[in-house]
Image (spheres, helix red, strand yellow):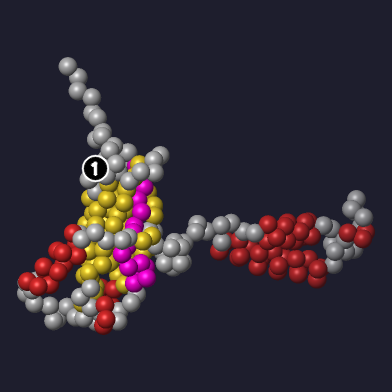
Amino acid sequence: MQHQHRQPELVEGNLPVFVFPTELVFYADEQMSHKQVLTLYNPYEFALKFKVLCTAPNKYTVVDATGAVKPQCCVDIVIRHRDLRPCHYGVYDKFRLQVSEQSQRKALGRKEVTATLRPSASQEPAGPRPHDEERRLKEQFAESEFFEQTAYQTGRRKSESRPAAGGPSLLTVLLGLVCMAALMLPTLGEQESTVPVYLHLSVNKKLVAAYVLGLLTMVILRT
């Protein structure tokens, strides 16, 4: 008897979501920690689209707050803390990663990740303090209101979302063709030519056309 491979039942809210890490810790005195990366895995045989929500979107910048993950692939989501004031020390915020199938709008699954800002890694105790751990657990399981990252908050730097380099502009190509045509015309003073005399160019004009064509060639090669 042949056993057919079946994908899991796509019931709203029941699909397991695989995210690492499940807690983000930012340190105010460590520049490197101000940028954290969440990795969203898709172990399934169908593509997923995702959306990142947050309880405090004004404190964070999320690069690619929405997107898609191909089957059996993963995607990195960059999160930056942009409000490092002491009044935010020890406050636990939450991110919610919500996934759905490409062709559907309903959320098939969601996963919440906690985030907190601390003053310094050197001041951290060896283990979590009981009252901090208790507060974290209470805030983690409490019902929270999540907000979407707006277009302003998900603004990417050019280095992170660089469009593919395009070819030379139409004006550059046309100007190059004109210079090539000028070089192919007869030189002023040539007698045996069927081209009208007014199209005969002087040596100086041809030198200018050759110079411009050389510049255009450099521009085209750099694009």
Dividing the picture into quadrants, the one containing residue 155 is bottom left
**Residue 18 to residue 86: above or below:** above
The residue singled out by tag 1 in the image is: 14
Q: Is residue 171 visible?
A: yes
In the image, which residues are magenta?
Answer: 47-61
The structure residue drawn at horizontal position 9% and vertical position 73%, both measured from the top left corner, is 131
Whether residue 157 sits left or right of residue 139 in the image: it is right
Q: Residue at x 23, y 50 (%)?
A: 18
Quadrant of the frame with the N terminus = top left
Instruction: Say whether residue 160 is magenta.
Output: no
Which residue is rendered at x = 16% and y = 64% of the image? 138
Measuring from the top left, give residue 99's x and y in whole percent: 32, 48
Q: Amino acid at mark 1?
A: Asn
Q: Is residue 196 left or right of residue 93?
A: right
Which of 164 and 109 lies nearest the eye of the viewer? 109
35 or 97: nearer the eye? 97
Q: Main secondary structure of the magenta part?
A: strand
Please tell me whether residue 49 belongs to the stretch shown in magenta.
yes
Q: Is residue 12 left or right of residue 131?
A: right
Q: The C terminus is located in which quarter?
A: bottom right
Residue sitting at x 22%, y 69%? 92
- Helix, strand or loop status at disc 1: loop
Q: Determine crowd level at label 1: few under 14, some 14-19, many 20+ residues with C-alpha closer than 10 A.
A: few
